[in-house]
């Protein structure tokens, strides 16, 4: 039997912009997806809680296994500390964990490239930021490409993650935004601005300047809400709850339309305080 594991992720800044070639800042979170694989006569994927496996997901796992050099049939059992559809990278973490189980010892670039098989099935035309974040530990600066640019970012921070209570697929906001972009020139300007914010956020993060970083989270959320239109009432409530609990700044994370929000904390004790006040959970990203 072989085992693979990978963490979930949050997008700190630059979601959606990254689809159009602008940079994003993303971080692995200490919540794992684990896969145990054993040879079997026919391929089978067992999701947590007996969730049914769409045929195209199984097919993508078979192709991933083959590309990783695993020729036999398999039974892959999945356990997850990340709720599926929560916007915290469960599908990318599943892809990276499968890659590590089928190709033990593979490096982060190869694991991320293999995981793209699943991402393409589940997300259409993904930028690749999710598998890159889930295959690295810590925080990364990412620009899509063949191959993508993935640079480690120094430093650490504490966050409170608060779910919106709405599960959703990434496609549900990425495709409508692509459509609206054709007729609304403001959207390209907002996407470019988000890319600039990713560059600034990287510098502030590395310098440990949390107050301006919090203000930058607020600014990024403003653009994602309007004109990009990828927030929703439940995410607005989550962001407002994090702010009124005392977060230095808060924003939706990932595709939006549901999923989760993140609030920046001063330190881990503050993140735990925010978690107690809002019902979210505290995480440390990057270095301790
Ligand atoms: O799957 P999510 O919610 O983490 O969203 C991924 C980030 C997007 O920029 C919205 C999509 C992408 O492919 O980069």
Image (spheres, helix red, strand yellow):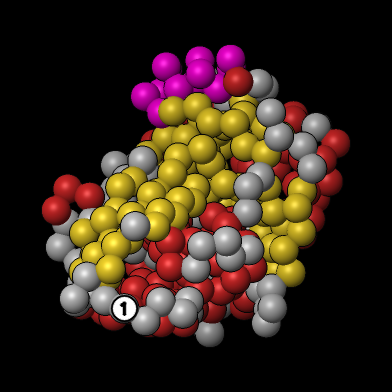
Circle 1 packing at 10 Å, graded few (<14), some (14-19), many (20+), is: some
Q: Position of residue 214 (x, y in %)?
A: 68, 35
Task: Classify mark 1: helix, strand or loop.
Answer: loop
Q: Position of residue 53 (x, y in %)?
A: 20, 67
* Residue at the image position 43 percent from the left and 61 percent from the top: 101
Confirm whether residue 191 shows in the render: no
Residue 46 on the magenta span: no
Report whether 247 appears left or right of 254: right
For the magenta stretch, what is the residue range? Answer: 269-280
* Residue at the image position 29 percent from the left and 42 percent from the top: 165
Q: Quadrant of the C terminus?
A: top right
In the displayed structure, 159 sits above or below 120; it is above
Q: Quadrant of residue 16?
A: bottom right
In the displayed structure, 241 sits above or below 131; it is above
Q: Position of residue 135 (x, y in %)?
A: 57, 57
* Residue at the image position 51 percent from the left and 38 percent from the top: 30
Q: Which residue is mark 1?
A: 72
Q: Position of residue 251 (x, y in %)?
A: 54, 43
Residue 274 on the magenta span: yes
Q: What secondary structure is the magenta-colored segment mainly?
A: helix
In the displayed structure, 189 sits above or below 86; it is below
């Amino acid at each position: 039997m072989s085992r693979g594991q990978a963490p979930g992720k949050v997008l700190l800044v630059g979601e959606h912009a990254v689809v159009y070639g602008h940079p994003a800042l993303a971080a692995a979170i200490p919540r794992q997806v684990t896969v145990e694989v054993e040879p079997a006569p026919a391929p089978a994927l067992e999701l947590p809680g007996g969730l049914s496996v769409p045929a195209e997901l199984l097919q993508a796992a078979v192709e991933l296994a083959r590309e990783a050099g695993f020729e036999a049939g398999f039974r892959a059992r999945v356990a997850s500390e990340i709720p599926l559809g929560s916007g915290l990278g469960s599908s990318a973490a599943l892809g990276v964990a499968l890659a590590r189980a089928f190709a033990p010892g593979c490096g982060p670039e190869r694991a991320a490239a293999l995981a793209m098989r699943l991402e393409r099935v589940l997300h259409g035309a993904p930028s690749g930021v999710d598998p890159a974040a889930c295959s690295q530990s810590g925080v990364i600066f990412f620009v899509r490409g063949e191959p993508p640019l993935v640079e480690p970012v120094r430093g650490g921070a504490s966050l409170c993650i608060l779910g919106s209570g709405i599960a959703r697929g990434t496609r549900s906001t990425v495709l409508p935004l692509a459509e609206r972009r054709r007729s609304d020139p403001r959207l390209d300007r907002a996407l470019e601005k988000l890319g600039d914010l990713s560059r600034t956020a990287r510098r502030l993060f590395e310098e440990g300047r949390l107050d301006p970083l919090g203000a930058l989270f607020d600014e990024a959320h403003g653009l994602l809400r309007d004109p990009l239109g990828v927030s929703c009432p439940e995410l607005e409530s989550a962001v407002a709850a994090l702010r009124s609990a005392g977060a230095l700044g808060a924003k939706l994370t990932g595709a939006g339309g549901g999923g989760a929000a993140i609030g920046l904390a001063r330190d881990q004790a503050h993140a735990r305080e925010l978690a107690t006040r809002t019902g979210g959970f505290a995480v440390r990203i990057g270095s301790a």
